[in-house]
Image (cartoon, helix red, strand yellow):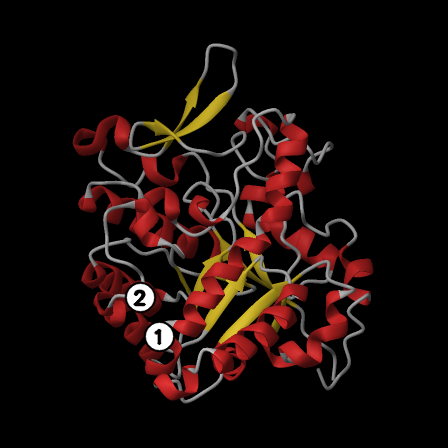
Amino acid sequence: MANIFISVDEHVQEHPEVWTKRLSRARWGGRIPYLEKNSDGTEQWIVDGRQIELDGVADCGAAMPDRTRNPRRWSEVPASVYDPKERLKVMDAAGIDYAVLYPTVAGSGGQIFGRIGDAELELACVQAYNDWLMEEWVSVSDRFIPQCLTPLFPIDAAVKEIRRAVKNGHRGVIYPSVPMELRAVPHVNDSIYDPLWTACQELGVPICFHAGASAAIQIPAYEGYSPTIAAASQAITRPASTVSVLVNLLISKILMRFPSLKVVLAESGLGWGAYLLEYTDFQATGDQLPQNGYDLMPSELFRRSCYLVGWYDQASLRVRSYIGSDNILWSTQFPLATSTWPNTQAALRLYKISEIE
């Protein structure tokens, strides 16, 4: 039986008309997400009247002639980044059967919309993205696996949109890993979020936390760095930001209270997972977690509920038996600069995937 290759972390580039065509200009005016032209001819994304922290108009270094430079004008954006038919050609060349999709302008964790203070505008932006993904990408091919965004808060609005989106065909939920960083909302461990975990568990869809979606758990690049070195620094530290997210999940009892909940930690990398699981179990024993209502060790909770994502990790695969082969997912990260494209097949061979795994 031939292997089926599912890249679980691919990014779509939202077209400039995603929101301008779907949201009422009479109601929202310049708060609608749109591309603004600068005096020098370059362009920038504006959301809720503010420029977002995106280097260029698209995050697509792997698709550019110079992968250290993102396009500054929409006319420079390669079609494979925003056109689903062109993306299928890249997938074919890379040997990808299916691609799980994450946003770009909205933020890899939906955090850009999470900062919008107006609940109605936030919901309108979220729904426009969710509908666009189904209408413009999934309608072209079922090889694209859509995941929905949700309003950050209130949680009942998030749950309502999750149920609507899943009914329409979405197969995963993207949520900011540190919501309390974005707005004055309760800590993610608060029971007020229980309906969110319940909905994902009942609907059988994973909740996905993408590395780099929270500035609060990633050291900012030194201001003296050149743009290229700053980008490298952020890319290298991004997977490490997942450590705090995973530790919180393992210690918070969320995974104990929702035993069927599945959590994907996108762009996490793998190698640190073995260290963290071993250390967390060691510390849990020393701090007497088993005597304080924890019926499973952290590593057991992880193997039941969580998934790490690798893409370059040759050395890290040596510890995959400790992490758990069933808890390791693969991606190409296209079209981000960190992607293995155009050498995806060579990178994949390093995984030495067996029929059993």
Residue type at tag 2? Asn
Q: Are marks 2 and 1 in contact (CB under 8 Å)?
A: yes
Callout 1 secondary element: helix
Q: Quadrant of residue 10?
A: bottom right
- Horizontally, residue 78 falls left or right of residue 120, namely right
Q: Which residue is mark 2?
A: 189
| Identity of the residue drawn at 54% across and 79% down | 281
User: 151 or 18: nearer the eye?
Assistant: 151
* Residue 340 shows in this picture: yes
Residue 18 x %, y %: 38, 40
Indicate the amino acid at tag 1. Answer: Ile
Left or right of 289? Residue 236 is: right
State the quadrant of the N terminus: bottom right
**Residue 262, above or below 122:** below
Mark 2 → mark 1, Cα distance in angstroms: 7 Å
Instruction: Give residue 181's mark.
Output: none
The numbered mark, 2 or 1, whose residue comes first in the sequence reads 2
Which quadrant would the C terminus be assigned to in this image? bottom right
Q: Crowding near pointer 1: few (<14 within 10 Å), some, many (20+)?
A: many
Q: Which mark is residue 254?
A: 1
Q: Is residue 30 above or below residue 168?
A: above
